[in-house]
Image: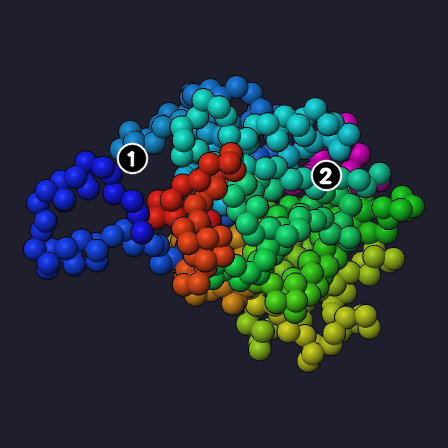
Amino acid sequence: MFAKNSIQESHERQISPPGSKRKRRRLEEPARPQHQSLNVYSWNVNGIAPFLQPSVASYFQAASSDGNTGQSAAKASLRDFLRRHDWPTVLCLQEVKINPDDAATIRAVEKAVRRQANEPDDAYDYEAHFSLPSDDYNARGFGRKVYGVCSIIRSDFRKRFVQKIRPVSWDAEGRFLITETRAAFGIPKLAIINIYAVNGTDNPYKDPNTGKVIGTRHDRKLRVHEQLEAEVRQLEANSFSVVCSGDINIARTPLDGHPNLRTFPNQHCLNRADFEARFLADSTNAAPPIVTSPEQGRTTNVTDTPSVPSTTDFRSVSMVDTFRHLHPTQRGYTYYPRTKPFGASCDRVDMILISRALQSNLKKAGMHETVQERGPSDHAPVYAELEFELDPGAEFEFGNDPGNERGDGETVPSTARTLV
């Protein structure tokens, strides 16, 4: 029960209300929240450096704001981004372009997401976790400032839920980082996968151990599809509900490309079909995926490769594309190349996919497709909100009235915020 202030108590001692009103006052005490939300954001930032500068009004306010909607210029600052979007639970960044030996930049990112001393009391603290390239043959360009992902996790969520943050054994280019959580407060075990998928090209792909050319980047992309599918399948077998968040480097349908969907060269169509078959097809009617034979550097149909299931055995993991599920006919794009006027050529290649088990928890999904929100990047941020019913017994796990830690040692009453 919440304590009343002394003035109110004194007033009530002097004038005692009728019994019916006393009863009504007890019933009107602040109610605990019945649901809790988990907000996931994803953004390919195309290099982290501009976000480490002091907070400024915009990454160039030259791009005019839309006066009708009241949009203001977005700031090239991670704290500003987090604040502007109401403190997301997790922010997955792709293509951070940090040399894995650059400890100073890594520390700068960690500092850039921490709660600052001069911020309001309702500001949250965050932690930054990285997966950066270690491949000596396929990630050497630009002073090794290529690829790389960073998962920025709210400290209160990390302390209460997160059990492990790990890369994957089958990638050395810094493209994947998995955050695994425990089940608590009515939220199931989650595996949030930060993804920067391979961009399929005819450029050579080399064995990361020997440097020998074993295929193309198209072959590598298809192989990564296969490995990611196996990872998702294993996580779900271990009772995790999976959230895949990031730059998939595939536009799914004509709705996802403007002025049209890319169909040349044909290998892009094969890559698209493979992704659909493995991750999004109805598991009972899935077409066979395409897989690679890396040793020969070629693509094959799944039925030609003994090491993978036959057509009749194959079952898609059948995930849910959050944006397309809630907006089945709406056009929306996330990749806006800076070499063309904004909106002249664009694709929806950034997505948040969820396990079918989370479909009923999905409440919102979208993208912030404006010049201001694109900022210094060539991608717009995407988001999804999942809502979970509060476990009635959860209030006893951290005491009768657990606060919601901001990460700075202080607490906020549980009635003021959701638990995540």
Mark 1, residue position: 69
Question: In the image shown, does 337 or 397 lie closer to the viewer?
Answer: 397
The residue at the point 16 percent across, 39 percent down is 10
Question: Left or right: 203 with respect to 280?
Answer: right
Query: Residue extending furthest bottom?
Result: 312
The residue at the point 82 percent across, 61 percent down is 293
Question: In the image shown, does 21 or 119 lie closer to the viewer?
Answer: 21
Q: Secondary structure at mark 2?
A: loop
Display colour scheme: rainbow
- Residue 341 image position (x, y, % from top left): 47, 32
Res 391 quadrant in image: bottom left
Mark count: 2
- Residue 311 image position (x, y, % from top left): 70, 76
The residue at the point 51 percent across, 36 percent down is 409
Q: Residue 287, relative to residue 247: is it above or below?
A: below
Label 1 Cα neighbours within 10 Å, binned few <14 / some 14-19 / many ≥20: few
Question: In the image shown, does 275 or 11 lie closer to the viewer?
Answer: 11
Q: Choose the circle earlier in sequence order: 1 or 2.
A: 1
- Residue 159 image position (x, y, % from top left): 57, 46
Question: Left or right: 62 with respect to 16?
Answer: right
Q: Amino acid at mark 2?
A: Leu
Label 2 Cα neighbours within 10 Å, binned few <14 / some 14-19 / many ≥20: many
Q: Amino acid at mark 1?
A: Thr
Query: Which of the numbered marks, if any, corresponds to residue 245?
Result: none
Q: Secondary structure at mark 1?
A: loop
Mark 2, residue position: 132
Q: How far, Cα to Cα, is label 1 from label 2?
A: 38 Å
| Main SS of residues in magenta | loop
Q: Which residues are magenta?
A: 137-149
Viewer can see residue 38: no
Q: Nearer the viewer, mark 1 or mark 2?
A: 2
Q: Residue 269, relative to residue 134: is it above or below?
A: below
